Image (spheres, rainbow, N blue to C red):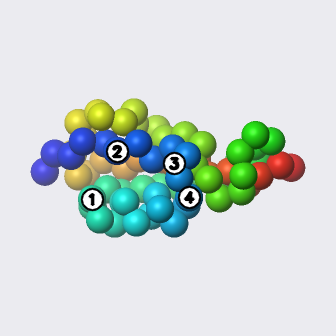
C-alpha cells in the first residue's frame, strides 16, 4: 500500500504516535535537546512530507527534550 507522508514536525509526541497508528506508518522516535523547541515537540522527520511511501517504510521522528 502506498501512502503520502504527512508533516509530522511541530506536533507533540502523542500526536506523532496517533498519526502513525491511524495511517499505519511505522515510526521510530529519537530524542535530542533543543534550546528553541519545547520538550515533547517533534523537530524533524527522516522522510519529507508529501513523499509517496510504502507501508513497509519506517520514518524516524526526532522529538525535543527541551533545553539541556
- Furthest-right residue in this view: 68
Q: Which residue is mark 4?
A: 12
In the rendered structure, which disc, 2 or 3, sits on the residue that comes first in sequence? 2
Task: Decide which of tag 1 and tag 3 comes sooner along the chain.
Answer: 1
The residue that disc 2 covers is 6
Residue 63 rendering spot, x and y as whole percentages: 61, 52
Report crowding for label 3: few under 14, some 14 to 19, many 20 or more residues within 10 A (C-alpha): many
Q: Which mark is residue 23?
A: 1
Residue at the image point whose x is 71% and y is 56% from the top: 39
How many discs appear?
4
Callout 2 crowding tier (Cα within 10 Å): few <14, some 14–19, many ≥20 = some
Q: Earlier in the sequence, mark 2 or mark 1?
A: 2
Q: Is residue 21 left or right of residue 61?
A: left
**In what element is the residue under mark 3?**
strand
Residue 24 figure quarter: bottom left
- Closer to the N terminus: mark 1 or mark 4? 4
Left or right of 25? Residue 59 is right
- Label for residue 61? 3
Q: How far separated are the C-alphas under marks 1 and 4?
A: 16 Å
Estimate how packed mark 4 is, as few (under 14), some (14 to 19) or many (20 or more) residues with alpha carbons within 10 Å.
some
C-alpha distance separating marks 1 and 3: 15 Å
Amino acid at each position: 500500500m502506498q501512502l503520502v507522508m504527512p508533516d509530522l514536525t511541530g506536533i507533540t509526541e502523542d500526536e506523532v504516535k496517533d498519526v502513525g497508528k491511524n495511517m499505519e506508518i511505522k515510526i521510530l522516535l529519537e530524542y535530542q535537546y533543543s534550546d528553541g523547541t519545547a520538550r515533547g515537540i517533534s523537530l524533524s522527520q527522516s522522510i519529507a512530507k508529501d513523499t509517496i511511501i510504502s507501508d513497509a517504510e519506517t520514518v524516524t521522528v526526532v522529538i525535543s527534550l527541551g533545553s539541556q
